[in-house]
Amino acid sequence: MRRFFYEPAQEAAGYILIKGAEAHHIRTVLRLRLGEKAELLDGVGGVVYSRIDQINSDSVSFRILSRRQEPENCRPLTLVMALLKGKKMDMIVQKATELGVHRFVPVITHYCEAQSRDSQMLPRWQRIMLEACKQCGRPWLMQINEPASLHQLNIPAESLKVMPWEKETACSFSTLNIETETRQPALLLIGPEGGFHSEEVEYARGCGFKTVSLGPRILRAETAALTATVLIQHCLGSLSYMSEF
Ligand code: SAM
């Protein structure tokens, strides 16, 4: 099933009119025809099952056949990710979207390298996130923050805060008891290629982060991010249809 995003303002009297780049994509790239069905997502949980009713030079009109509203995850996970070099962040944005991460917060830490920052990264991540939502059928957009320094982070007091750290040997994910411990939102903090500065570890601990091990091998930052995301999402019930929340 093809999926497209729309804005509430594009809906009127049983129809949704898609314009601009998305309409061009539907008409010229995908070459969809009259009568073809698609799911239209509003980005805040709304899913509209629809059929193409009209194709114009600059717009495509979908007739609404049915709609449903998907509830928002009530144990949202925020992934706080130190900036990495090259395309690694793009890949993490895509996978975090697929894995149901609620908010993606890029952070600048002591050992982040200067070339990690480029002016186009935010619009590019938005595009990657939208495409991933369409591909995996996620009707809630992942929120993406502007990069900020670790010390500027807004850390909710009432939250589960987890920080994988390769020097932690005593505490692992299984000792956190995430399933039973809390119904609060969760924050996951992952360091850059160069790891965290010892002062950052102390600062994060002071903010309530629990340092945990991901095993005896030092993982690449992107491997650590995805591994820890899967572990937390599993415990929070976000990888299951059987979620009790
Ligand atoms: N510079 C560090 C070193 O060489 O010792 C390694 C940093 S690692 C590439 C990047 C990030 O991944 C770390 O800051 C941490 O958040 C996470 N990480 C990697 N391996 C880990 C492990 N075995 N346990 C917990 N966290 C790990």
Image (tube, helix red, strand yellow):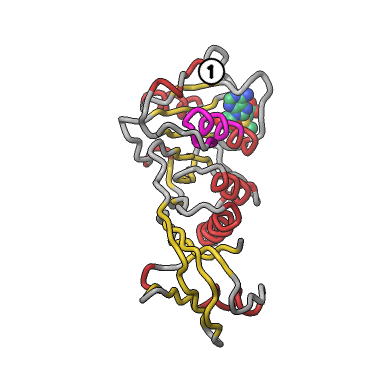
Residue at horizontal 44 percent and vertical 45 percent from the top? 103
The reply to whether residue 181 is in sight is yes
Residue at horizontal 58 percent and vertical 59 percent from the top? 131
The region drawn magenta spans: 227-240
Give the image location of residue 16, x and y in percent.
Answer: 44, 73
Left or right of residue 159, residue 127 in this image = right
Task: Please rate how many residues cluster around mark 1, counting C-alpha atoms within 10 Å: few if below 14, some from 14 to 19, many from 20.
Answer: few
Left or right of residue 203, residue 241 in this image = right
Quarter of the rendering occupied by the N terminus: bottom right
User: Which residue is nearer to you in this view: 33 or 3?
Assistant: 33
Please say if 37 is above or below 236: below
Q: Secondary structure at mark 1?
A: helix
Report the residue marked by disc 1: 174
Q: Quadrant of residue 32?
A: bottom right
Q: Residue 101: within the magenta? A: no
Give the image location of residue 10, x and y in percent.
Answer: 40, 74
Give the image location of residue 213, x and y in percent.
Answer: 57, 21
Among all residues in the image, which is located at the extreme top?
170
Among all residues in the image, which is located at the extreme right?
217
Residue at horizontal 50 percent and vertical 33 percent from the top? 242
Quarter of the picture for ligand 1?
A: top right
Please say if 188 is above or below 69: above
User: Which residue is nearer to you in this view: 10 or 39?
Assistant: 39
The reply to whether residue 195 is in sight is no
**Given the image, on which type of amino acid does mark 1 rest?**
Ser
